[in-house]
Amino acid sequence: MSIGSKVRQYREAKRWSQEDLAVRLDTTQTTISNIESDKNIPNSLLLNKIAKELEVDINDLLMDSSNNIMTNNEFSDHAVAAVNQYNPIFNIQSPELIESILKNQDQITKLIESQNKLIESLLKKG
């Protein structure tokens, strides 16, 4: 069962509408709807808030009843796999990523230089 299905199940057990849960979480009904329909996966902070509001263990939302997210204060292999399915792993040394970072740094440098010229011209006028 998906995280969204479990959120819906626990929410409905409390006889809350999506709007009721959204208000309790300081979010929108659309966010709750997207989570429950598996269009969005909540980040860890929101997932923790959901578990607290619904008064369920976060393990119940993340895993089947037989698979706990943590055992002896270590993440289980199942938990790591569950998280990784939503978070692609990036090779931080890939040439494409390095090239993109350098390009962004170059653009930032140009923006700063442009900003400095603008400030200088404004100061000269003042």
Image: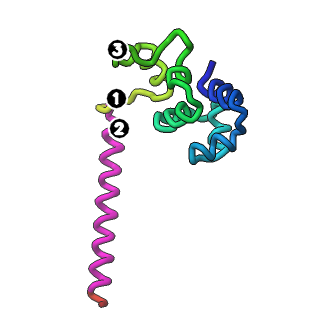
Q: Earlier in the sequence, mark 3 or mark 1?
A: 3
Q: Main secondary structure of the magenta part?
A: helix
Determine which residue is flagged by label 3.
72
Q: Are marks 2 and 3 in contact (CB under 8 Å)?
A: no
Q: Which label number is shown at residue 97?
A: 2
Determine which residue is flagged by label 1.
91
Give left or right: position of 65 versus 34. left
Q: CA distance from mark 2 to mark 1?
A: 8 Å
Q: Earlier in the sequence, mark 2 or mark 1?
A: 1
Q: Position of residue 18 (x, y in %)?
A: 69, 39
Numbered disc 1: secondary structure: loop
Residue at 31% over, 90% down: 125
- State the residue in front, 86 or 5: 5
Q: Which label number is shown at residue 33?
A: none
Q: Is residue 68 above or below residue 92?
A: above
Which amino acid type is marked by label 2?
Answer: Leu
Which amino acid type is marked by label 3?
Answer: Asn
Is 118 a magenta residue? Answer: yes
Residue at 32% over, 58% down: 108
